[in-house]
Image: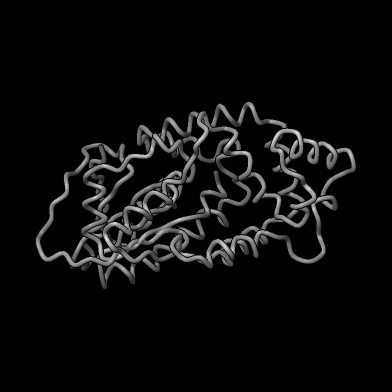
Amino acid sequence: MIFYSLLTVFFFGCKAQKAVTFVQQKNGNTLLWEISGNGLQKPSFLFGTFHLLCKQDIHFSDQLKKAVNFSDEVYMELDMDDPSTMLGGILYMNMRGDTTLSDLYTAKEYTRLKNYFSDTLKMPLTLLQKAKPYFLVALLYPRMMNCSSPAGVEEQLVKLAKEDKKEIQGLETMQFQASVFDSIPYQWQAKELLKNIDSFSVNKKEFETMLDYYKNQDMDSIKRMLGKSEFGSDKYDDLLLTDRNKKWVKKLDSFMKKESVFVAVGAGHLVGDNGLISLLKKQGYTVEALKNK
């Protein structure tokens, strides 16, 4: 989930002349938040995504649609509307230098890995020799889904934004995201990939639990689960979450003073002391839960 957690934020371009009110949620069990105060002329919005759901489970509330329509721009982690983003994903998924996957494993481990990709994923590992191991973990997630048509929440948000003729921007570039993984030792990534394969059944159950929390918009449970097992990586939390959140808040502080923005990032980026909700409040903003049913 962490990798997926490296993909998305939106912005929209539409004029809102009339005052628009949004219905608040009394408790914090929501994925949709309103950002106001601290000198903002218009509110902005924060929405937590989940990078892979069964397509039939992706629904957008009327209030979320209204927030998108109200906003001037949509920001995701990456500019999902830019063809070069996908091209960049291909270019930057490879490890630096001459390192290959076979260099990172013993002969026995590599054989196990190769057989898993061939027999279970139906994918020859020879085509992925240069890929960063952490990127390959993402290939396991579709097998954890209880449906044949998994889709990304961000992908559906792009469609919604286009319907409203909103411009989509990215908080990061694919090159930057790839550099984050280059900062994590490939040897450690390789061990994590094999660990995920060996613990697949356990991870699948935890993934299903996380899906339930997300669909129920249970932010407290999402917060508690992050940091456990594969859903968090304490060793590299600063790189994968905290540092990126702080950079995003600096950017949003500038963007929101100019226009209303709708920001959609992985739900894991919203929660915790170093999550976006907490960091924005520390910057002096009022961040309030909105109903999202």
Image-based side of 289 in relation to 3, left or right: left
Residue 259 image point, x, y percent:
25, 69
Toward the right, the furthest residue is 107
Q: Quadrant of the C terminus?
A: top left
Residue 134 image point, x, y percent:
66, 49
Q: Nearer the viewer, residue 194 or 288?
A: 194
Q: Quadrant of residue 196?
A: top right
Image-based side of 4 in relation to 74, left or right: right
Residue 82 image point, x, y percent:
47, 66
Q: Quadrant of the N terminus?
A: top right
Residue 120 image point, x, y percent:
71, 33
Rendered view: 208 above or below 84: above
Whether residue 268 is visible: yes
Rendered view: 140 above or below 253: above
Label count reads 0
Here the colouring is: one colour
Residue at (13, 52) in percent of width and height? 21
Whether residue 278 is visible: no
Q: Nearer the viewer, residue 54 or 174?
A: 54
Rendered view: 193 above or below 208: below
Residue at (44, 49) in percent of width and height? 266
Q: Quadrant of residue 97?
A: bottom right
Q: Nearer the viewer, residue 135 or 219?
A: 135
